[in-house]
C-alpha cells in the first residue's frame, strides 16, 4: 500500500471495524512488549536474585528471586491455594504463626530444592 494522501481516510471509510481492531491489537501487543521489557530489566538486576526473604514478598516473588519453580515452595505453604498473591506476612497471620516460622519454612524448602 502506498503512502498517498487519503489512504487512511479510505481505510477509515471502508474498513472502519478492521482499522479499529488493528489499533486495539497493536495497543495490546504494545502493552505486553512493555511488560516483558520491564520484567526482563527488573529480574536481570543481580540485586533481585537470591534476596533475603522478608514479609512483604509473595511466594511467587521468592520463587523467581531464587530461580525455583513455584511448586518447589508449595510444600512449605500447604494451605496456600495455587495462584494466591498473599504476602508471607499475610500467610503467617492467616496461619496464626510468627513470620519467622514461615520464613524458616521457605528457606528450608529453598535448601531442599537446591540440594544436589
Image (cartoon, grey):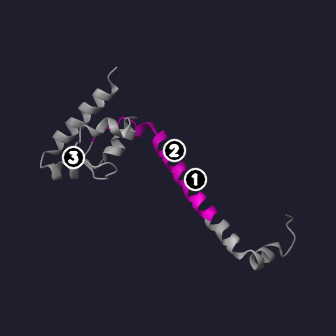
Q: Residue furthest top?
A: 116
**x 51%, y 44%: residue:** 40
Nearer the observer, disc 3 or disc 2?
Answer: 3
> Where's the C terminus, which quadrant?
top left
Q: Where is 82 relative to 63, above or below?
A: below
Total of numbered circles in the picture? Answer: 3
Residue 22 position in % (x across, y down)? 67, 66
Q: Point out the tag, 3 or 2, that comes first from the N-terminus.
A: 2
Marks 3 and 2 sit apart, C-alpha to C-alpha, by 31 Å
Whether residue 7 sits left or right of residue 18 in the image: it is right
Q: Where, by quadrant of the figure, is residue 16 drawn?
A: bottom right
Magenta stretch: includes residue 65 = no
* Main SS, magenta residues: helix
Magenta stretch: includes residue 47 = yes
Marks 1 and 2 sit apart, C-alpha to C-alpha, by 10 Å
| Residue matched to label 1 | 33
Q: Please state which of residues 15 and 98 is positioned toward the viewer in this rendering.
A: 15
**x 40%, y 36%: residue:** 49
| Residue matched to label 2 | 40
Q: The magenta stretch spans which residues?
A: 25-53
Q: Point out the tag, 1 or 3, that comes first from the N-terminus.
A: 1
| Residue matched to label 3 | 79
> Where's the N terminus, which quadrant?
bottom right
Marks 1 and 3 sit apart, C-alpha to C-alpha, by 35 Å
Residue 59 position in % (x across, y down)? 31, 44
Q: Where, by quadrant of the figure, is residue 72 drawn?
A: top left
Circle 1: is it few (<14), some (14-19), or many (20+) Cα within 10 Å? few
Amino acid at each position: 500500500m502506498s503512502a498517498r494522501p487519503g489512504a487512511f481516510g479510505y481505510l477509515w471509510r471502508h474498513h472502519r471495524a478492521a482499522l479499529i481492531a488493528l489499533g486495539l491489537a497493536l495497543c495490546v501487543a504494545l502493552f505486553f512488549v512493555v511488560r516483558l521489557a520491564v520484567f526482563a530489566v527488573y529480574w536481570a538486576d543481580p540485586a533481585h536474585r537470591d534476596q533475603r526473604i522478608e514479609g512483604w514478598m509473595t511466594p511467587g516473588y521468592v520463587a523467581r528471586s531464587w530461580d525455583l519453580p513455584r511448586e518447589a515452595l508449595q510444600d512449605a505453604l500447604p494451605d496456600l491455594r495455587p495462584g494466591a498473591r498473599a504476602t508471607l506476612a499475610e500467610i503467617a497471620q492467616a496461619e496464626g504463626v510468627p513470620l519467622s516460622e514461615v520464613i524458616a519454612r521457605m528457606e528450608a524448602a529453598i535448601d531442599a530444592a537446591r540440594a544436589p
